[in-house]
Amino acid sequence: MKKMELNAGNTIFKKGDPADGLYIVGKGSVGIYFPTNPLEPSVIIFVSTKEFEKKLEGSDMIVRGVMAILSERLRDLQKRR
């Protein structure tokens, strides 16, 4: 896990970047950037895909099942857009 403190206007990732992990907003706010959007300083926690999968492997079977269902639904939603 890595804590990142970002100033207003910083880019976390861009459209088309490969999915490399999970980003959790610990403080502040983030959004889709348009030149007219005001952004504020934020604290982001980054968990790499490898770290996330390792933590998930050690979790309860029910938690893994719920995560699998949510992931599949999110993928389906993204495909429809």
Image (spheres, rainbow, N blue to C red):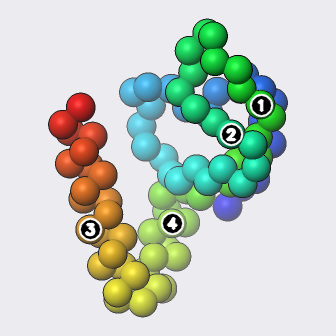
Determine crowd level at label 2: few under 14, some 14-19, many 20+ residues with C-alpha closer than 10 A.
few
Mark positioned earlier in the residue sequence (1 or 4): 1
Residue at image location 46% in from the left, 85% down from the top = 59
Determine crowd level at label 1: few under 14, some 14-19, many 20+ residues with C-alpha closer than 10 A.
some
Amino acid type at image mark 3: Ile
Give the number of the mark in front: 4 or 3. Answer: 3
Residue with the mark numbered 4: 52
- Does residue 24 appear left or right of residue 21 in this picture? right
Residue with the mark numbered 3: 69
Mark positioned earlier in the residue sequence (3 or 1): 1
Amino acid type at image mark 2: Ser
Of residue 35 and residue 58, the one placed in the foreground of this image is 35
Residue 22 vs 40, above or below: the answer is below
- Does residue 2 appear left or right of residue 68 in this picture? right
Kindly check if marks 2 and 1 are in contact, taking CB atoms under 8 A apart as contact. Answer: yes
Residue at image location 66% in from the left, 50% down from the top = 25
Disc 2 from disc 1: Cα separation: 7 Å
Percent x, y of residue 68:
29, 69
Secondary element at tag 1 = loop
Disc 1 from disc 4: Cα separation: 27 Å
Q: Quadrant of residue 35?
A: top right
Determine crowd level at label 3: few under 14, some 14-19, many 20+ residues with C-alpha closer than 10 A.
few
Mark positioned earlier in the residue sequence (4 or 3): 4
Residue with the mark numbered 1: 40
Residue with the mark numbered 2: 29
- Does residue 79 appear left or right of residue 37 in this picture? left
Mark positioned earlier in the residue sequence (2 or 4): 2
